[in-house]
Image (tube, rainbow, N blue to C red):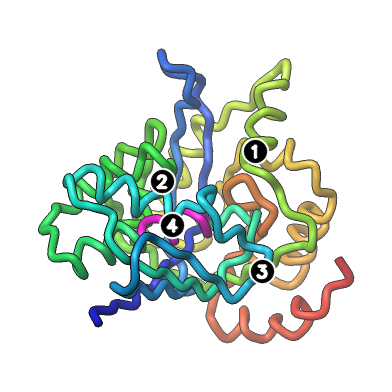
Amino acid sequence: MNQITVKAYGKLNLGLEILGRDQRGYHDLRMVMQSVGVYDLLTITEEGQGMRLTCDDNRVPADETNLVLKCARALLQEVGRPQSGLTFHLEKHLPMEAGMAGGSADGAAVLAGLNELLKLGLSQQRLCQIGVKLGADIPFCLTGGTQLVEGIGEKLTPLPDYTAGAFLIAKPIAGVSTKAAFLAYDGLEEKPSYGEAFDALLEGVRQNDPVAASAYLVNALEPVCGVPEVELLRQRLLKAGALGARMTGSGSAVFGIFPTLKEAQEQLEDFSHLPF
């Protein structure tokens, strides 16, 4: 029985700017993405017949709507391989509807894991080409690190590893649907523009400077997330000593950048007992 376990790392958006729409109607994005140490665990086993997904969190749909099965089927179809017996077990640690790429991280883990388990020999570039059709964050989740991400998520430019400071991430009970967030943004009469701020953020990240980077954290979706607790969390993080704080992705998780890991850890207790 062949088996592999893959870590599906989540991400933060230090910057998220929406430049408009491309010819296909997709949102044209410019983002600074950063991998974080929080991850789901995906175990893939060759056994039985057909495909089956189980999860330790019953809130996660274990059916054909899940990116795990979608990515598995897309990969096998791409290489012309019969959909033989595969069992996927997902151990969830990344929160749902948080903007941390939980689903995309799991999808990326499937592509990378099956490529290794079945000895398909596909390049990372080809895996990204398969993944981006199913989730805009999948190419980044396959490669990770610190990157400038553009287009619909398919254009990746590696940046120097951002190692300065420490992230403290908090999520309110209420989540945000990615689809709903973009629909709300599309409904704005006046769209926000972050050109100069985004450029300054990029420079701060390139210089590995937490003070400079924290001053220019931007997210075009934060004003339309519809979760009041996001701003409450952001202000609380700033009062706790964060150099900067911002919602990640479509939300609703909020992160703060602290000068040191020790300073971030000192705030864990307070943020572990929030009333919302």
Q: What's the CA distance linking mark 3 and mark 1?
A: 28 Å
Q: Nearer the viewer, residue 73 or 271?
A: 73
Residue 147 percent coordinates (x, y) = 35, 51
Q: Earlier in the sequence, mark 1 or mark 2?
A: 2
Residue 102 included in the magenta stretch of the image: yes
Question: Pointer 2: what residue?
Answer: 202
Magenta span covers which residues? 101-108
**Which disc is residue 230 wearing?**
none
Check the picture and name the quadrant holding the C terminus.
bottom right
Q: Is residue 13 visible?
A: no
Q: Nearer the viewer, residue 109 or 174?
A: 109
**Residue flagged by tag 3: what amino acid is it?**
Asn
Question: Pointer 4: what residue?
Answer: 68
Q: Earlier in the sequence, mark 3 or mark 2?
A: 3
Q: What's the CA distance linking mark 1 and mark 2?
A: 19 Å
Check the picture and name the quadrant holding the N terminus.
bottom left
Q: Which residue occupies 46% across, 68% down?
A: 36
Of badges 4 and 2, the one in the foreground is: 4
- Decide: marks 4, 2 in contact (CB < 8 A)? no
- Predominant SS along the magenta part: helix
Question: Pointer 3: what residue?
Answer: 58
**Residue flagged by tag 1: what amino acid is it?**
Leu
Question: Pointer 1: what residue?
Answer: 221
Is 276 left or right of 36, judged from the image as shown? right
Residue 57 percent coordinates (x, y) = 63, 72
